[in-house]
Image: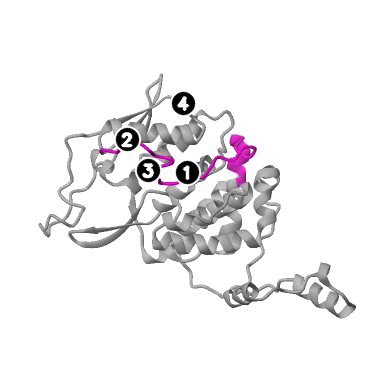
Amino acid sequence: MWHSTGGIQAGHVRMSDMQLATPDIRQALIVAYASVLDSLGLARHARPLVLPNGEFFPDIFKADEASVQRLLDRLLEHAGLSDMAVVVKFWNEGHEPSCGTGACGSGGPAAEEPTLERLVDDGDAWRVNVLPAEARQPVALSSALCRALALAVLREADAPPRQLNLDLAVDLTAVALGFGLLLLEGSHIYRKACSGPSVSKSTALGPNELAWVLALDLAASGQSARALPKYLSPTQREAFAEARVWADTNIASARMLRTEPRRLARGVLELREPASRLSRWFAGSRRKPSAADAGSIDELEAALANAVTPRVPAKPRAPDPKLDEIKRLVEEALSD
């Protein structure tokens, strides 16, 4: 049985977390995501991407337990899980942190949030524990609820991807359920506090890794990503823009997530690196000759030469402990 680790609270991240994922990590993540889609039977029918707007969440939110329950019910509906019994419970309701908004002016350290088990099996329903203070933090709350539902799906699955690290499987399952954008926003949360600005996250993967998986998922299902940037914070917007370039360059592999996830889960793929930013700018500013339009042998040869995108050698990067840890998790996930 899958068990919650209890460690679903936001953790602090360093600037090194913002390094771009390496090609090896991108490849490991697409293999891991294919394994989740195949094991849970989510490859056949793509869920619509849930956006944080009034169309998806028309209810009035008052930051109380009833409001959080309505939010959870909407998430269940959008993910096609309305028949799953899940109830919200405010946990440790008497606890109130001394600060966290930067408005108290006390200058003292903020009280530590108590740990909790996010998802509990009560027999006739799943219980999602929520701290009252979390209800006043929309980004952290929504991503935490998405991860709780993903964990419930994994624990109810007949054949879950047991070879995957649990935290990794939870994030990837949440993306597959249509919660990718909500999770991406929760991967890098900027806040002001008494001690100064801080960055935290309520996900296991960072923004670059989640942006990559989300971009792949949208490319695989053929959903438009045009409206996404306006819902993303600057860091996430930049990460997703880069991920889209990679996904567009590897559209064939992305589509295999829906058509042949089992093959991808065995690692049968080779990612192509996108052209340089300068090359992409020139490609957008002028139309390359097409073989279909060629009117002579010279024009045909020019069109065929332009059809081959030169590989751009990756620049060597300094070792990054965070990326090494993500790669370790993914490699562990893919090992028997």
- In the rendered structure, find residue 50 and report the number of the disc placed on it: 1
In this view, the residue in front, 274 or 318, is 274
Residue 45: image x %, image y %?
62, 37
**Mark toward the start of the polypeptide (2 vs 3):** 2
Going by the numbered disc 1, the residue's amino acid type is Val
Going by the numbered disc 3, the residue's amino acid type is Ser
> SS of the residue at dot 1?
loop
Front position among marks 1 and 4? 1
Distance from Cα at disc 4 to Cα at disc 3: 18 Å
Q: Is residue 90 a member of the stretch shown in magenta?
A: no
Going by the numbered disc 4, the residue's amino acid type is Met
Residue position marked by numbered label 4 in the rendering: 84
Q: Is disc 2 in contact with disc 4, using a CB cutoff of under 8 Å?
A: no
Residue 15: image x %, image y %?
37, 66
Compared to residue 176, the image places residue 329 above or below, namely below
**Magenta stretch?**
34-62
**What residue is at 54 percent from the left and 54 percent from the top?**
225
The dominant secondary structure in magenta is loop
Front position among marks 2 and 4? 2
> SS of the residue at dot 2?
helix
Q: Is residue 335 visible?
A: no
Residue 213: image x %, image y %?
54, 52
The image quadrant where one finds the C terminus is top right
Q: Is residue 99 visible?
A: yes
**Mark toward the start of the polypeptide (1 vs 2):** 1
In this view, the residue in front, 232 or 273, is 232
Q: Residues within 10 Å of mark 2 (few under 14, many from 20)?
A: many
Residue position marked by numbered label 3 in the rendering: 142
Distance from Cα at disc 1 to Cα at disc 2: 17 Å
Front position among marks 1 and 3? 1
Residue 185: image x %, image y %?
40, 52
Residue position marked by numbered label 2 in the rendering: 68
